[in-house]
Amino acid sequence: MTEPYELCASDAIKQIQNKTLSIHEWVLSCLKRIKEKEPQVKAWAYLDEDNALNKAKEYDELKSKDKVGIPFGVKDIIDVANLPSGLGTKFYNHNIPIRDAGSIAIAKNYGCITLGKTVTTELGHRAPGPTANPNNIEYTPGGSSSGSAAAVADMMVPICLGTQTTGSVIRPAAYCGVIGYKPTYGDFDKSGILPNSPSIDTLGIMSRSIEDISLFRSILLEEKNIILKNIDLKTIKIGFVRTPNWEDTDNETKNNLEDLFNNFQSDKINIIELNLDDIMNASNKLHIDISGYEFKRSISFERFNHHDQLSEVLRNGRLNDGYNVNNDLYQKALKELNILKNKMDLIFDDFDLIITPSAPGEALKGLEFTGSAIFNTAWSLIGNPCLTLPLFKGKNGLPIGCQLVTKVGNDNQLLSYSKQFHSLFI
Amino acid sequence: MTEPYELCASDAIKQIQNKTLSIHEWVLSCLKRIKEKEPQVKAWAYLDEDNALNKAKEYDELKSKDKVGIPFGVKDIIDVANLPSGLGTKFYNHNIPIRDAGSIAIAKNYGCITLGKTVTTELGHRAPGPTANPNNIEYTPGGSSSGSAAAVADMMVPICLGTQTTGSVIRPAAYCGVIGYKPTYGDFDKSGILPNSPSIDTLGIMSRSIEDISLFRSILLEEKNIILKNIDLKTIKIGFVRTPNWEDTDNETKNNLEDLFNNFQSDKINIIELNLDDIMNASNKLHIDISGYEFKRSISFERFNHHDQLSEVLRNGRLNDGYNVNNDLYQKALKELNILKNKMDLIFDDFDLIITPSAPGEALKGLEFTGSAIFNTAWSLIGNPCLTLPLFKGKNGLPIGCQLVTKVGNDNQLLSYSKQFHSLFI
């Protein structure tokens, strides 16, 4: 028999509507699963069990379709009222906001239930938390939304929120084997989220089904459930982008994606090779300057008051990048970014969808390094919506993702294409 | 004899360096001035006297040029660690952040001393706080940075920080008769500031001298003091923009600006009429959609948890604007905004500086309405740096400002032009 924690949210909601499941049973099942798996996986920075169970009971009694009762996890750089925002540091246990982040308030208003805060890397940068990859706990879950990806992958919760400035939603989702979705830049509200680089930061969703991504997206946008369209992939034009870093990917990633490319061509799907090396190389350079400059400013309180408590990788990484950029260079970089945005828009005049790696391969062994975001940087910077599907396996048996990308603003199309695409593999 | 509170910061710092003034004397003088004037003007939401005096002593003892000791006021939607962030509401006395906003942390690190939090309108929108215009307390100080403008105008403090989403720095500065500066969009860090509309919100500075604006700008950018250049106004090209709302301005504003235009022409300064009606009308429309949509999201916690405590003007104003916009329309509006940004950039290829009204006239009688931002909307939306100079007087004897605007990114030029321009009138 399927345990409630195994259900994706869309299916659980159907069972609740059919009265074969209660919200309380669903939440309780997730909490039991967490109890069982958390000692190994360490996905949670803070659990809010009592409140979650109380809310579940309240919504069961209400019997209102407007209170969906979806349990979800929240990356610990996103404020939830009255829960600690540890921000992935050891010195913020006493940081307890009294306001929900905008997107959390919206989700709660729709009856979503916060189970707690999920582990983030230090201030959303690279220094890892304790979380392990649930597929094999000797391997990294990726970062910075480490706990969110691991919690969804380990079926502790159907949906988690993460954020992406470089590759922090797509990469951990790919490493843990779940669906990760980073919307168009600006699509979801970011108030109450620790800024890393406000010109790039994007709130994203992780889940185990496209339907759940679409459902939670419609909740966060406060719009009626966006209907996923059935798309015949033969009616769209797909670009296959190896990127300038193709040689840095492992063989399984390369082989699986090349097979996919060849099979699609054989199946008369309109997929052609697309070279974006120039724009991607330019993006990688610009991303360092813009994210460095903005990160340095955003974490000013920490660098002046907690400098010695910050990790070396933070001080020598993005913070140091920031010290190398002055306001003149930053303003120029923003102008160059605008040019890149326009260029990418023109590229998508000719392509409906791009397929490209989500990460250089499966998750790396050890928890010290959360992996490379080289396949995510350009999309984060330029603001395109992207989604990773857990389609393949690596040589160590860990998941490998395939990344789908559409034009800025075409999020609904991305989700519909992804559903169709995913259905070919399951 | 000049009292220390009367000094602009640049002059006080010179006296401190010459040992004719101590930081403690300066801060004490400001606090005494506040004690004297605050009962009528009501510029402050919270005063932090003891901490300010302690810091002043500490920096006096340090005798370091790296701790300038400038007392400043902070609009109460900007977080200062361990001080209440009331956000212009009655229900946030217990909202006490433990982190400084990025820009506050930067200013403090340079030895600037927070005297306290200044009154803001409700959540940075239109419902006024108790602040009165120090030129005549029967008149509005403007908003939303009401307390900041009034405190600087009344010489309670040399410098205050405000924020602008529509006209919330320029208008109150103009109404109170101080210099207000809204930099290029994105120029100063905004982390730890309540977002109204993140695509537009900008942190700005109010002071009584251009030198102080330039000094505080260099502090917030963590760059060496930007040197104001001496500019011969005959070497630049100036556009005189009446705007589509010229007929809505009062006679004193119109006459003074027309005189200025004619005098400049007689003086062989290269000033010509520039019609931006199309771009300004488009901006006014777009601003409603973008700021409404983003504001509705940013204050989600308040609309779901404190709805009945919010003012009618907030609920029927920007919040209602937001309910009229869906994500599709919002994404389209952002694209249109990009087009407007490019158009405005092209206009500034032909003009070094634009001169235009700061507000429709002098401050209005009564404290209920903070005035129209119609002369600020386009610059806020498109992101141009702008500055208001208190050049004229209205028929009630209250100040009238003149607004100077340059191309996005040309903030240093704006400050240099403004200095030269100001020197013609003082």
Image (tube, coloured by chain):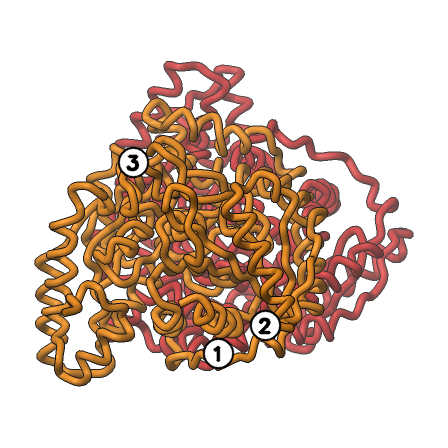
Chain colours: A orange, B red
Q: Are marks 2 and 1 on the same chain?
A: yes
Report which residue position mark 3 lands on: A138
Picture coordinates of residue B366, whole percent (x, y)? 42, 70
Q: Quadrant of residue B422?
A: top right
A318 or B165: nearer the viewer: A318
SS at badge 2: helix
Q: Amino acid at mark 2?
A: Ala
In the drawing, what numbered circle is on residue B325? 1
Q: Quadrant of residue A345?
A: bottom right
Of the two numbered discs 3 and 1 in the rendering, the one whose residue sits closer to the viewer: 3
Instruction: Name the chain under label 1.
Output: B
Picture coordinates of residue A139, whole percent (x, y)? 33, 38
B268 or B303: nearer the viewer: B303
Report which residue position mark 2 lands on: B333
SS at badge 1: loop
Query: In the displayed structure, would residue B108 be above or below residue A194?
Result: above
- Number of numbered discs visible in the structure rendering: 3
Q: Amino acid at mark 3?
A: Glu
In the drawing, what numbered circle is on residue B349? none
CA separation in Å, label 2 and label 3: 47 Å
User: Is the residue under label 1 in contact with that under label 2 (CB below 8 Å)?
Assistant: yes
Of the two numbered discs 2 and 3 in the rendering, the one whose residue sits closer to the viewer: 3
Instruction: Name the chain under label 3.
Output: A
CA separation in Å, label 2 and label 1: 10 Å
Picture coordinates of residue B332, whole percent (x, y)? 59, 73
Q: Quadrant of residue B215?
A: top right
Q: Amino acid at mark 1?
A: Val
Instruction: Name the chain under label 2.
Output: B
